[in-house]
Amino acid sequence: MRYDAAVTTDIEPTAPPRLLRINEVAADVGLTARSIRYYEELGLLKPAARSEGAYRLYDTDDIERLRFIRGLRDDAGFSLAEIGRLLEGEAARARNRARFRESTDHAERLAIVTDGLARIDDQIAILREKEARLRAMIVEAEGRRRHLRGHLADLEAGREPAHPPAGQRADPSPSTGPVAASGRRDRSRS
Amino acid sequence: MRYDAAVTTDIEPTAPPRLLRINEVAADVGLTARSIRYYEELGLLKPAARSEGAYRLYDTDDIERLRFIRGLRDDAGFSLAEIGRLLEGEAARARNRARFRESTDHAERLAIVTDGLARIDDQIAILREKEARLRAMIVEAEGRRRHLRGHLADLEAGREPAHPPAGQRADPSPSTGPVAASGRRDRSRS
DNA sequence: CCGAACATTCACGTGCACGGCAAGGTTGCG
DNA sequence: CGCAACCTTGCCGTGCACGTGAATGTTCGG
């Protein structure tokens, strides 16, 4: 039941600016209409247009931005407030594009682009920072894995568990360590 | 007097197992006591001990785990539910450590360690997955930056802006400032 | 032109992740 | 022993990020 399929039979060199309604975008980017409206309420984006009857209409650029927002939320784990701050640059960039097109002053154009560049650099820096933190956690986890792997090797070689797993102390062994648990003290398992 | 020191050893080369109370750990790892209790309520951790008067007492291992939790929350952006799932492995690992110590069956020990290894591998995989997503976002942003940088070079060389910035036409649609409803109340923390 | 499907704006409800307070018990130092 | 400082378990409140109607308006194929 796609009624909107038949558009112009014309072959236009420029793609027609297909505007989508909220639920279409929602399905497209994997959000709910409610969320999208909420994001708008927070000032994270504004639909490219409104229909005559005030329906929100989104263009591909909006969809792009929504995907970005979703990524920041799901992949990067930012709060919407943080995303808002990150997107300030985005919004400014959009405005700058308009100003850019309207401007003919070379110096101003240059300034606008330079500014945009700086904003993007900021975004990238923030993302990189987050990535570094994540990376650190991964490295730590890998360390634990390595430790355990060594332990496993010891076991396979029939050696003693010289090191207790992880950082736990719980080692009331004498100082001049004779091996504690070599004997067979039955406790619960056999 | 604490009853925990049943040590009976004359000189201890290993540091005594200092157990900390909730606010000490809180300050230490950068959480609130409330949060820590909440995490316990969710089953994310259990204090190593309780004092005679039911005070929660944490050992270095607990602190380690709390740091991990905080990292997963802040750095990786996981929900506490997700963290809970990730830490299922952790909890099981802790139980396994006890079982391990009590076990003398070589095969069982080996199985326990192998299991723990698999669990950690899962954790690492999940973290790596998240990192990859983040990385993808960064790459995308870098692409945009590169694009803009090329643009800038064009401008500096006095060339024409052959390519319009980024993906799509942003319909100017100036004038009209219907203002809509942009609630800008930004309550942020952290 | 009509009706089903979709949209709009309130407005209240919900789950998560705590914050904060009350009423009382515990620790530990002097 | 006294007492301040710290802790305990409730329990209600709060901000965020939406979910879920309700009442109403808009699109569009038939």
Image (cartoon, coloured by chain):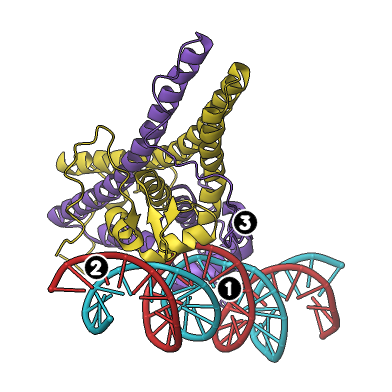
Chain colours: A yellow, B purple, C cyan, D red
Q: Position of residue A141 (x, y in %)?
A: 35, 43
Nearest the viewer among B20 and B101 is B20
Q: Position of residue C12 (x, y in %)?
A: 52, 86
Above or below, B92 against B72 in this view is below
Above or below, A182 against B50 in this view is above
Q: Secondary structure at mark 2?
A: loop
Pinpoint the chain carrying mark 1. Answer: B
Pinpoint the chain carrying mark 2. Answer: A
Above or below, A66 against A10 in this view is below
Q: Amino acid at mark 1?
A: Tyr
Mark 1, residue position = B55
Q: Quadrant of the N terminus of chain A?
A: bottom left
Residue at 35% in and 48% down: A164
Q: Position of residue C13 (x, y in %)?
A: 47, 85
Q: Earlier in the sequence, mark 3 or mark 1?
A: 1
Are the residues flagged by discs 3 and 2 from a single subunit? no
